[in-house]
Image: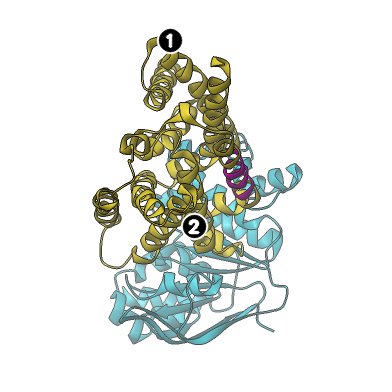
Amino acid sequence: MLDDFMVRAALAGIGVAFAAAPLGCFVVWRRMAYFGDATAHAAILGVALSLAFSMSIFVGTMTVALLMALVVNVLSGRGYAMDTLLGVLAHSALAFGLVAVSFISGVRIDLMAYLFGDILAVSRLDLSIIWGGAALVVALIGWRWSALLTSTLNEDLAYASGINPKREQLVLTVALAITVAVAIKVVGVLLIAAMLIIPAAAARPLSRTPEGMAIAAGLIGILSAIIGLRAAYVLDTPAGPSIVCVAAITFVATSILKGLGHQR
Amino acid sequence: MSLIQVEDLTVRYGASTALSGVSLHVEPGEIVTIVGPNGSGKTSLLRAIIGAVKPVKGRVVHESGVKIGYVPQNLHIDETLPITVSRFLKLPSNVAAADISYALTQAGVPDLAKAQLSQLSGGQFQRVLLARAIIGNPDLLLLDEATQGLDQRGSASFYQQIETVRQNTGCAILMISHELHVVMSASDRVICLNGHVCCEGTPAVVASAPEYRALFGTGTGGALALYRHKHDHSHDHGDHNHDHTEAAE
């Protein structure tokens, strides 16, 4: 039945939007956009390794994404500017991943499915993993919310309040790795960062508090997933990119709204 | 017992030594100012006290149960982060609305609770940081160049605010400043830092100490005397201080 895979796709999109919203806000606030990109690009290496060792894709991508994030954490502040470091790691990981995939003979891999996602092929198992991962990310960020927010505002303020900002950074890193692993099926490696950043950025003009921004980002992400999927079905366009397009249009709309507000 | 006791503190960043063998203490209710040129380890010292940097040698002893309020220097709030003043004061843990309005009043900005943090002027923002630091009635306020970016009038009035807070709450204050002419006169003790403690004493003693003169020259001497009269709290060394700095001119 048509509804069935569309419903599964919609639920998958909603799950990703749900996790991406609060995490995406921190990515925006902490100017970690490129960090999200790097973690996501590394995931393609995870795909290659998963196939080579016939592991679950989720486990493989999450492991590599986590390793990537930890390497960045360790190397940052050691003589290279952050953007240089991320540029080197992200693109190396992507290149090594693509090369590694070519070595895997005998298995026919639809690389495009990992680069751009394959949301219409989401299975029941995928769905439970997506929702499990999303719930974990939201719970993790919800639990550490105040500490994360304080560390984001100022590291020394955090220390003075007895919070270790390095530990909070690690929490975000882990949440990012989980989100990447979960979102790879839905929007693919290349558009994960878009799902993190665009709903959060679109929510900014509508918000007065951090909590408000996270909730607005969640709603925008969920709406984008539903409308994007519907548009993809009607217009016969690729599903993942269509979702991102809807989010981008929302961003433009809220930016214009904000501009009008300033004129008044 | 001292509120905090810094013992033989040495802090290194990689190969460079920020502080070596620094010892100091702060007693209840006193104002201690740390002066020193750029790169003299002033900020490292405060960061070691709040636990943001681990010393390679020495230690910082807090009196048991001592509460510290911290006002950082030059906090930048990214415009992408929407947050109201009152939400900011509730971080990291919730605070009663009455306490928030009391702290804002103490800091001289009673009407800002609903304002967006990123929309505040420099002076308002520093006062909000002060309000956040005095929530929960700290025994000790740490201020790290809290008037950076304020003009002379703005910083003078900020320091008056701090004195008001001190009078109302009786907390001790340990602060760093470049603006010696305003700060030193209000201080009970001044510590001149340059990687190590160069000299220490009442404002008058430090202002006339050869170590201090070697670091800062004599140019601030006159200004110190000028501002001396603007502060109403009195110590018996006041006149002495005056004479000294007049002589320096």
Residue A8 lies, with reference to residue B13, above or below; the image says above
Magenta range: A131-140
Percent from the top left, x then y, of residue A82? 30, 56
Residue B211 lies, with reference to residue A110, above or below; the image says below
The type of colouring in the image is: by chain
Res A234 label: 1
* SS category of the residue bearing label 2: helix
Res A130 label: none
Between the C-alphas of marks 2 and 1, the distance is: 42 Å
| Residue A29, quarter of the rendered image | top left
Percent from the top left, x then y, of residue A109? 33, 40
Question: What's under tag 1, amino acid-wise?
Answer: Val
Kindly identify the residue that appears in the image at 44 percent across and 58 percent down: B73
What residue did someone put label 2 on?
Answer: A169
The crowd level at tag 1 (other Cα within 10 Å; few <14, some 14-19, many 20+) is few
Task: Specify whether residue A136 is painted magenta.
Answer: yes
The colour assigned to chain A within the rendered structure? yellow
Sequence order check: which comes first, mark 2 or mark 1? 2
The quadrant in which the C terminus of chain A is found is top left
Task: Specify whether residue B126 is painted magenta.
Answer: no
Percent from the top left, x then y, of residue A81? 26, 58
Q: Which chain is cyan?
A: B
